[in-house]
Amino acid sequence: MKSKQVNQPFVERAESLIPHLYEKKVYPAHIIDVVKDAGAFQGWRTERIGAAEELAGRVLGKGDSVTLDFGDHHVGYLTLSILNVNSNADAPLRLKLIFGEMPCEIGEDFDDYDGWLSRSWLQDEIVNVDVLPGTITLPRRYTFRYLKIIVLAASQRYSISFPEVHCTTVTSGDVAQVKPLPDYMSEELRELDRIGIKTLQDCMHTVFEDGPKRDRRLWIGDLRLQALANYETFNSNALVKRCLYLFGGMLLEDGQVGACLYEKPSPFIDDIYLYDYALFFVATLYDYYEATKDRDTLDELWPIAAEQLRIGLQRLDERGIVKDDDTWYCFLDWHEELNKQAGAQAVLIYCLKRGLALASGLGDSDAQAFISLAIKQATDAALTHLWDKEQGFFTSGSKAQVSWATQIWMVLAEVLEPEQSAALLDRLFEQPPAISMSTPYLYHHLIEALLLCGKKEKALEEIRAYWGEMIKDGADTFWELYNPSDKKLSPYGSNLVNSYCHAWSCTPTYFIRKYFTEKDS
């Protein structure tokens, strides 16, 4: 599928910014078993049964297996050195390799998978090796901590051993660019920061991927949060610039910025349009300019950003409220029952305000005029039609739904006066709506809303309670979604296909470094 509107110079600009990939060779840390345990996260735990150095001395025949723990989350290419034992290899060796970010992926049978995303996302391979002894490197990039090797077939004459197993990791995130935290920072915050950085690094390749296991795509909602974390850590600002030019260089038929894009075989935009994600092109450009003061990029991409605001405003009804029907989709959070009308209204106002700041800086008086008027009209409409004074909450949709997402985004859009927003957040915790939060993506915005209202202590409490609980449940990198009350939750029908290293979950490092490096944090 090709975009209907391609700006080839923009695409070429993006392609000129492809970053260098840093490689590192890593080895297994332990030999383990994965054991069923109802008390463990998602029902599985690991049990160490040997040192990694013992692997070379292990002899395996048909039906045997070994499971390796690489000690941390890795993204890269697996290499196996294989030695035939007892006799020459008179028949090909057939191996099954199963890769897992989490123990459940090793413990559960992929053949029982019944999710609605493709089975091909589950990471396993059957490999035939014709010549032994020898060394093979798998051509596909894998994302894993755990590796199970099963000998499916050899011959009666020979067995095998593995003198060496390693992974060559790849990332465009240069950890040498990340400044250490001050010595006085607590170990708890250091660990949250470290895992946030690792999450971001493992999602940094030739674009900011949403997840290195699945989908391996550039999504603008993830990009926006990755870029914020990047400015506080890796400073790979050219990679943010590359991603902005890719989105700006390949628009959908009516000029919208697409929600996600692919790099291979050559860059092309998917046909998915999300109302909020297209508007976030404006916010991402705003954040990029604030971090870099790159005026040339702003000059070139501003017309596309301004157009997203105009397109977004076309969706307003006669009341000035985003139309809520079957002709659109807005993300906000993974929640089947979440009505997204009011949240979309707030995202529109939020991005209009960032667009106004860019237009003012550029001296674009025409844009300033239309954006200023739009902000007033959209804000007045939200207060008139969506604010329920009796409940003290904003409502959404024909059934006047109250949700966490709606309140969070209305606070971020600064629709109310600051003291009113602070009171709204207090009520949110005192009278929590039934339509709750499912993803670190929405939790990120909750933390931003708390910080905007000066509730720094509460923001830190929520970071510790949410991402900290993830660490207690075994996170090496932060996950795509996490619900402490439903730890097998998946929007895809199976937790096996969930992404356990996901871009939008990396932002504890952003918050810690931007807001919590003082001695009293």
Image (tube, rainbow, N blue to C red):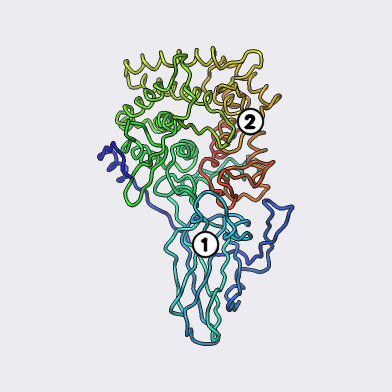
**Front residue (pair 259, 234):** 259
Residue 400: x percent and y percent?
60, 21
Side (left or right) of 49 relative to 130: right
**Front residue (pair 426, 486):** 486
- Residue farthest left in this picture: 9
Residue 34: x percent and y percent?
66, 62
Residue 473: x percent and y percent?
67, 48
What kind of element bears circle 2? loop
Picture quarter with the N terminus:
top left
Picture quarter with the C terminus:
top right
Please give the name of the residue rendered at 67% of the width and 22% of the height, measured from the top-left corner.
426
Depicted 330 relative to depicted 397: above or below: below
Amino acid bearing label 2? Ile
Please give the name of the residue rendered at 68% of the width and 56% of the height, measured from the top-left corner.
44
Please give the name of the residue rendered at 29% of the width and 41% of the height, measured from the top-left corner.
13
What kind of element bears circle 1? strand
Depicted 97 relative to depicted 336: above or below: below
- Residue farthest front in this picture: 326
Quadrant of the rendered structure where residue 170 is? Answer: bottom left
Instruction: Check whether the beta carbons of the residues at disc 1 and disc 2 lie within 8 A of each other.
Output: no
| CA distance for labels 1 and 2 | 36 Å
Depicted 426 relative to depicted 108: above or below: above
Q: Which residue is mark 1?
A: 124
**Front residue (pair 327, 384):** 327
Q: Which residue is mark 2?
A: 435
Q: Residues within 10 Å of mark 1 (few under 14, many from 20)?
A: some
Q: Residues within 10 Å of mark 2 (few under 14, many from 20)?
A: some
